[in-house]
Amino acid sequence: MNLRGQALLDAIRYLPTIRSRQAELKGYAQLRPETKAALHPLVSLGKLGRIDQSERILDAVVEKVGTCFLDLNTTAYQTCGDWEALCNPDDAYSAWRSFVRRQGAVTPVALLRDGANDRPFIRQVLKIEEEWGVAVIRSRRPSTDLPALQAALAAVDDVNNVLIVLDYGYVRQALEPKEADARRVISALRLTDPAARVVVMGSSFPKSVAAYGENAGTLEILERDLHAQIGGDEVAIYGDHASIYPEPFEPTVSRFVPRVDYCTENTWLYRRRREDDGGYVDAATRVTQSEDWEPAFTARSWGANIIRLTADNGPQPGFGAPANWIAARVNMHIERQTEVAMRAYDGIGGGDGDDDLDDLLG
């Protein structure tokens, strides 16, 4: 989105978050121009392949994604080499603000560190609001962080400049307690200021799909259910992790089982075939033969078109390993969820380690 300040926040209907990982950046980069024009994603800055220099990674993010909100990935094996310096709270997190300032396309997310003193955090929010015109705050522990979030809302010059992102992480098998927590936190924030802008975000894409079917399965997109159950767009903006498992886990180096994923508006389906049993070509063919396959979607999604090309013509360059297939899923998911969000707004309807664990044989 080529917008700034309140106009930018007013225009957000869907907030995907991705990390600066190769598969996620590629999936986003392959979105249609009209889809990118409707989005202003949240990107978590961390190691990119073997590159851990934050400046180089930020340049890659801007090249692949364009304008975005920038957060800092603090997961141990995914961090930039200088992440500790970047999230130093001295002088209201001046190191972080100075780093982001070098790229005009990027707006910093206010860093909310576990156990950090509230005073530097609040001063950081005020300085970001003053310089960038908006202040985005992401909480991965909404109940614990509630006092800090309320203090930020009370301190800013204009609450309409603030976007609070409640990130509930992995929501599968924990939907009801996270729904209850979201309701409670949002109610408390709206008591602080009724105009508080809130995103509710999560992911239900699992670390392993094996429990849902060894060779084939369908998974509901439960983050959509979470959003609907708290009241939908009338209560909060919908956000998600773009079909990526959101919790930290240590990747392993093993043989992979070829898997092709496909996204509908409400589900992910997958087909897995071992290399000696047809591999990616057979998995792609089985996806295109499923009742959920939408041929017209191949014209709107690079990822869906890769499935069609693989099924029709055989292996595609670069698609002999999981990473690019994850990119294809990310691309399909964001295209679908952007369509849902835009339709809902228009009143029509709607409501390394770049590998998933079970792509591998350990």
Image: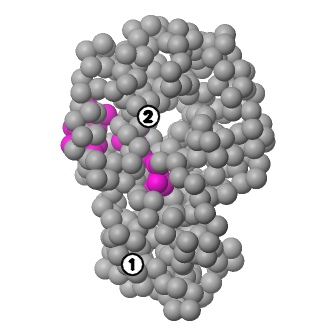
Determine whether the residue tagged by mark 2 lies in a helix, strand or loop.
Answer: loop
The type of residue carrying mark 2 is Arg
**Residue at image coords 75%, 38%:** 81
Q: What stretch of residues is rendered in magenta?
A: 226-246
Q: Residue 217 lies in magenta, yes or no?
A: no
**Residue at image coords 43%, 78%:** 271
Along the line of sight, the residue nearer the viewer: 9 or 242 = 242
Along the line of sight, the residue nearer the viewer: 234 or 279 = 279
Distance between mark 1 and mark 2 Cα atoms? 32 Å
**Residue at image coords 28%, 40%:** 178
For the C terminus, the quadrant is bottom right
Is residue 162 at all visible to an observer of this figure? yes
* Image coords of residue 68 (percent x, y): 59, 37
Is residue 307 at all visible to an observer of this figure? no
Task: State which quadrant residue 262 falls in.
Answer: bottom left
Q: Is residue 155 above or below residue 317?
A: above
Q: Is residue 259 above or below residue 164?
A: below
Q: Which mark is residue 214?
A: 1
Report which residue position mark 2 lands on. 140
* Image coords of residue 96 (percent x, y): 67, 24
Q: Give the mark nearer the N terminus: 1 vs 2.
A: 2
In the shown orientation, is residue 360 left or right of residue 79?
left
Along the line of sight, the residue nearer the viewer: 320 or 112 = 112
